[in-house]
């Protein structure tokens, strides 16, 4: 199979020399070729350049992209896309004035999702989840991280991770699986928190490692959830099983979780709505990617991650959806990129870098995904005719995507 895309108005995020991530000032630059061609063989990007240099070669398929932008697909490095049921009733309760705590006390929140998931069969969970997967592919996502964490029992956490594995086997997009047993304390362990941490470390982790069900381990490090000591113990155990580390940190409170993540050489620290100078200093010089989740801030009306402070300190930043039934029932990376520009004052160049190459870095796959680079996997978005790439975040809420290519094949 060979595919040639010609007359591309702008081919964006072109990196002749592959980079694994872009930081600070570098994020302001989005390398672009105007009036370009792109040549794909099987699932790989083989060649690209200005139309003047496009050789007249025999190909299986040609696409004329006149007036359109071609770019790498979005890399969404933080989702909880595998879940059962929805929580639209809590959404209505919150509009009517109930607080999150009141909703949780009524049996809502993560524990509500856990109860529903525990009572949903593996097949049903798979069927519900693939509807969302199909949807995010249409929205231009070509690589996705998916977390467990609505099981909260040995059996149900395994069920979630097996569903993620099944999605990996049946769908062409790149998927990374994360074990998030430490998402919340289940009701039966509320008076024995150490007991649940022991269950994660001694029962869940060995089984997950044995079935090779996870690439990453994650902890919800937050007041009322998992403390610094709990997080430290769980990450240390995860590392011993060869898992790479991530943390949900600083969503509501800043109390040293970022530094703990950096100490453990976490691949990413995610949320960061509350961020202080110590957190920024801890991240400087580290290999840990800060990840912002603006559609969560939008949905919950909580502060946005201070992107300007992070980028102006010379740090990198990635953007992801946090797709989940409670705080972000949306997997739309186009909306995330728009919201990052509108609410976090990121430039379109910074936001697109954050949602492609830096998102790929936060999944440990930026050697193969996240930019237009020879030898990388051909996961691409072709937009509808648009005046410039600035139009993509500007026209928020509009679907500008015409075609999605995954592994060199036209999907939609
Ligand atoms: Zn999350």
Image (cartoon, rainbow, N blue to C red):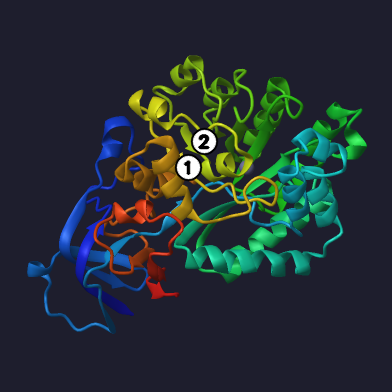
The image quadrant where one finds ligand 1 is top right
Report if residue 150 is visible in the image. Answer: no
Nearer to me, 290 or 376: 290
Instruction: Tell me if label 1 and label 2 are in contact, CB under 8 Å.
Output: yes
Quadrant position of the C terminus in the picture: bottom left
Q: Earlier in the sequence, mark 1 or mark 2?
A: 2
Question: x and y percent of residue 326 in the render?
Answer: 70, 47
Pinpoint residue 137: horizontal percent, then vertical percent: 50, 65
Near mark 2 (Cα within 10 A), the count class, few <14, some 14-19 or many ≥20, is many
Q: Residue at x 36, y 64 (%)?
A: 380
Which residue is labeled 2 in the image? 268
Q: Residue furthest front?
A: 96
Residue 164 found in image quarter = bottom right
Q: Is mark 2 within 8 Å of ligand 1?
A: no
| Label 1 residue SS | loop
Residue 389 place in picture, x, y as percent: 28, 55
- Asked if residue 339 is positioned above or below residue 211 in the image, the reply reads above
Residue 362, which numbered label? 1
Q: Judge left or right: residue 356 versus residue 176.
A: left
- At horizontal 26% and vertical 67% (from top left) the residue drawn is 68
Point out residue 174 in the picture as x, y percentages from the top left corner.
50, 59
Observer-nearest of 72 and 45: 72
Describe residue 328's horizontal placement relative to residue 351 as left or right.
right
Query: Marks 1/2: CA distance?
Result: 6 Å
């Amino acid at each position: 199979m060979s595919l040639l895309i010609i007359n591309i108005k702008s081919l964006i995020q072109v990196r002749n020399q592959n980079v694994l991530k872009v930081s600070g000032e570098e994020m302001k630059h989005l390398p672009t070729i105007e009036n370009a061609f792109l040549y794909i063989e099987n699932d790989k990007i083989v060649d690209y350049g200005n139309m003047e240099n496009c050789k007249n070669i025999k190909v299986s398929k040609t696409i004329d992209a006149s007036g359109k932008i071609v770019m790498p697909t979005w890399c969404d490095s933080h989702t909880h896309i595998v879940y059962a049921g929805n929580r639209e009733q809590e959404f209505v309760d919150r509009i009517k004035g109930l607080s999150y705590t009141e909703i949780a006390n009524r049996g809502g929140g993560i524990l509500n999702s856990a109860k529903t998931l525990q009572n949903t069969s593996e097949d049903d969970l798979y069927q519900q989840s693939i509807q969302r997967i199909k949807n995010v592919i249409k929205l231009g996502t070509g690589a996705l991280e998916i977390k467990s964490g609505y099981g909260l029992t040995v059996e149900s956490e395994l069920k979630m991770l097996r569903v993620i594995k099944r999605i990996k086997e049946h769908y062409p997009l790149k998927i990374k699986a994360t074990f998030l047993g430490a998402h919340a304390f289940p009701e039966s362990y509320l008076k024995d928190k150490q007991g649940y941490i022991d269950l994660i470390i001694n029962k869940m982790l060995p089984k997950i490692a044995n079935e090779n069900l996870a690439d990453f381990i994650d902890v919800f490090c937050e007041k009322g959830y998992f403390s610094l000591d709990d997080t430290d113990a769980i990450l240390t155990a995860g590392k011993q099983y060869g898992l790479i580390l991530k943390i949900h940190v600083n969503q509501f409170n800043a109390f040293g979780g970022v530094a703990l993540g950096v100490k453990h050489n976490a691949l990413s620290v995610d949320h960061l709505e509350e961020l202080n100078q110590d957190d920024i200093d801890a991240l400087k010089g580290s290999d840990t990617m800060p990840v912002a989740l603006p559609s969560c801030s939008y949905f919950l009306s909580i502060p946005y991650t201070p992107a300007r402070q992070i980028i102006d300190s010379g740090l990198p930043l990635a953007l992801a959806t946090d797709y989940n039934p409670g705080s972000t029932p949306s997997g739309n990376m186009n909306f995330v990129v728009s919201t990052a520009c509108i609410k976090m004052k990121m430039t379109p160049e910074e936001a697109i870098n954050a949602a492609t190459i830096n998102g790929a870095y936060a999944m440990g796959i930026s050697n193969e995904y996240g930019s237009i680079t020879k030898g990388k996997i051909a996961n691409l978005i072709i937009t509808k005719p648009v005046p410039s790439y600035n139009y993509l975040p500007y026209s928020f809420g509009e679907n500008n995507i015409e075609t999605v290519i995954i592994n060199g094949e036209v999907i939609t």
